[in-house]
Image (cartoon, rainbow, N blue to C red):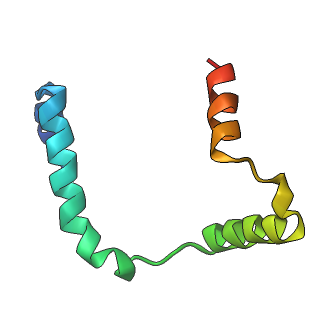
Amino acid sequence: MTALEIETVLKMPVERRILWVEDLWDSIHPRASQIPVPESHKKELDGRVGKYQNNPSALLTEQQLKESVASRR
């Protein structure tokens, strides 16, 4: 994408840009399984699953998560 094309997109109203991004994602999504997952992402996921398996009670409930997020505002 050229700088001129980017400028054109940035001049669009936000609503139109959102639709454009949705269209772009829809064009990528069918091929998403062909995109390789970086090793660092796999390691991060393995680490998070391991943390959960070692201490499942440490997870927040949905309500606790909402309260935690709300208290940060």
**Quadrant where the C terminus lies?**
top right
Q: Is residue 2 visible?
A: no
In the rendered structure, the answer to whether residue 10 lies left or right of residue 56 reads: left
Query: Percent position (x, y) of residue 7?
Result: 16, 31
In the rendered structure, the answer to whether residue 12 lies left or right of residue 30 reads: left
Could you say which is closer to the camera, residue 57 or residue 20?
57
Residue name at image x 68 percent, y 21 percent: 71
Residue furthest toward the right? 54
Residue furthest toward the top? 73
Query: Percent position (x, y) of residue 69?
Result: 64, 30
Query: Percent position (x, y) of residue 12?
Result: 11, 29
Residue name at image x 10 percent, y 33 percent: 8
Instruction: Using the rendered view, name the quadrant where residue 44 is placed.
Output: bottom right
Give the vertical position of 59 relative to 16 (above or below).
below
In the rendered structure, the answer to whether residue 62 lies left or right of residue 21 reads: right
Residue name at image x 77 percent, y 53 percent: 59
Residue name at image x 20 percent, y 62 percent: 26
In the rendered structure, the answer to whether residue 31 lies left or right of residue 51 reads: left
Instruction: Using the rendered view, name the quadrant where residue 67 is placed.
Output: top right
Total marks in image: 0
Query: Percent position (x, y) of residue 13?
Result: 13, 26
Q: Is residue 65 visible?
A: yes
